[in-house]
Image: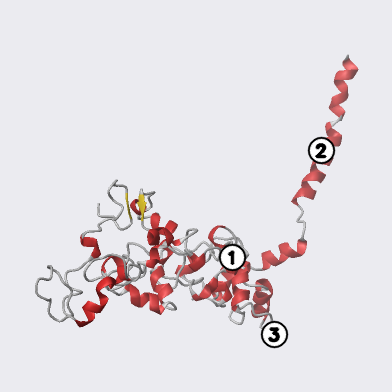
């Protein structure tokens, strides 16, 4: 028994050298050249010359907090720093200014390839060679989110989408100008999976996110409503009430030109063109050349144009 208890006292003499050897192997860098390159350059070294690019805005961004931040986007940074430090003017220049739009976007997609950017290459922006840096500022930016070159996303979009900006300046518009929503409330500028880069499978589904009361289902449905909201509404803005593409009753006449039997409708179009004075005995509201658009609105009676659940709501009057 005494010999068995004494045997383990000799084993630590062999274990200690093995542990020390393992520690040395683990602590040894797998790539000595990469470690030497990393030790020869640090992100703070770029501030020596590029103090404007590495200014306060960049220092507060997520890019600045990444390991080897500059080298994630710029190539040959360590060699460039070594050449500049030694006075070699022929060293590599890691500038991105000469890259094409697709090359710039490919640089960003190395990290931003998930979530909303997963289908960016299929988007209209990518197909029209719009680089990420045309909207986003990497070193300098003005927005709170997204590192945009403007304070609001609508201002960024309006730089190219001028017709839509003009519509948003009209009387009836979504509260984009007031800052209560932005272009990205409805559109995903990085996604090419949906038409018009909207954040839904269809225009109606997008509108229902806010206008849920118009979704239905209704006992009596209005066909144009189920088909497409933009058949009657202009989402970016108009000079007509409720974002309508035309004033009433003109808008309704696009479909209900005949068959209504109402004065002022297409059934009496020939009378409307010619009659300047209502004939004797004509009912009240007889259409004349001067009155056919005055005080006549389909919604005076048809109040539920989006659909009705009333048993007597076949004509959307209640």
Is residue 244 visible in this depiction of the protein?
Answer: no
For this orientation, the residue located farthest to the front is 281
Q: Quadrant of residue 71?
A: bottom right
How packed is label 1: few (under 14 Cα within 10 Å), some, or many (20 or more)?
Answer: some
SS at mark 2? helix
The residue sitting at the left extreme is 280
Between 112 and 79, which is closer to the camera in this rendering?
112
The residue positioned 67% from the left and 85% from the top of the image is 89
* Pair 2/3: label in front: 3
For label 3, the residue is 90
Above or below, comparing residue 317 to residue 80 in the picture: above
As drawn, 130 above or below 232: below
Answer with left or right where residue 278 lies relative to residue 59: left
Secondary structure, mark 3, is loop
The residues tagged by marks 2 and 1 sit, at their Cα atoms, a distance apart of: 41 Å
Distance, label 1 to label 3, CA atoms, is 24 Å
Instruction: Give the label on residue 69, or none.
Output: 1
Mark 2, residue position:
16
> Is tag 2's residue or tag 1's residue first in the polypeptide sequence?
2
Q: Is residue 193 above or below residue 74?
A: above
Residue 198: percent from left, percent from top: 47, 63
Q: What residue appears at the point 76 percent right and 65 percent down from the top-left corner? A: 33
Q: By what rule are the colours in the image chosen?
A: secondary structure
Residue under the point 81% across and 38% down: 16
Question: Is the Cβ of the residue at disc 2 closer than 8 Å to that at disc 3?
Answer: no
Considering every residue shown, the one lying at the far bottom of the view is 89
Q: Residue furthest top?
A: 1
Closer to the camera: disc 1 or disc 3?
1
Give how far across and how far down residue 113 sits, in percent: 60, 61
């Amino acid at each position: 028994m005494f010999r068995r208890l004494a045997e383990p006292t000799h084993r630590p003499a062999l274990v200690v050298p093995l542990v020390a050897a393992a520690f040395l192997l683990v602590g040894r860098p797998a790539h000595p050249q990469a470690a030497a390159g990393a030790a020869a350059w640090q992100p703070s070294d770029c501030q020596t010359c590029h103090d404007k690019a590495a200014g306060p805005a960049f220092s507060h961004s997520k890019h600045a907090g990444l390991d080897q931040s500059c080298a994630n986007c710029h190539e040959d940074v360590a060699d460039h720093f070594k050449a500049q430090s030694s006075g070699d003017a022929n060293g590599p220049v890691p500038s991105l200014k000469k890259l094409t739009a697709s090359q710039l976007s490919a640089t960003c997609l190395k990290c931003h390839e998930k979530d909303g950017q997963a289908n960016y290459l299929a988007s209209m922006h990518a197909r029209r060679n719009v680089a990420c840096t045309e909207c986003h500022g990497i070193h300098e930016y003005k927005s709170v989110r997204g590192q945009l070159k403007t304070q609001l996303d609508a201002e960024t979009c309006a730089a190219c989408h001028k017709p839509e900006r003009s519509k948003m300046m009209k009387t009836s518009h979504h509260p984009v100008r007031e800052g209560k929503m932005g272009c990205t409330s409805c559109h995903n500028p990085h996604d090419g999976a949906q038409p018009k880069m909207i954040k839904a499978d269809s225009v109606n589904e997008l509108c229902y996110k806010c206008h849920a009361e118009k979704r239905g289902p209704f006992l009596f449905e209005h066909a144009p409503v189920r088909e497409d909201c933009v058949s009657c509404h202009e989402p970016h803005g108009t000079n007509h009430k409720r974002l309508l593409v035309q004033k009433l009753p003109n808008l309704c006449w696009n479909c209900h030109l005949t068959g209504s039997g109402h004065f002022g409708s297409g059934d009496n179009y020939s009378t409307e063109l010619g009659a300047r004075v209502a004939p004797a005995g004509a009912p009240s509201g007889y259409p004349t050349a001067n009155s056919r658009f005055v005080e006549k609105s389909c919604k005076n009676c048809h109040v539920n144009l989006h659909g009705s659940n009333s048993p007597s709501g076949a004509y959307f009057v209640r």
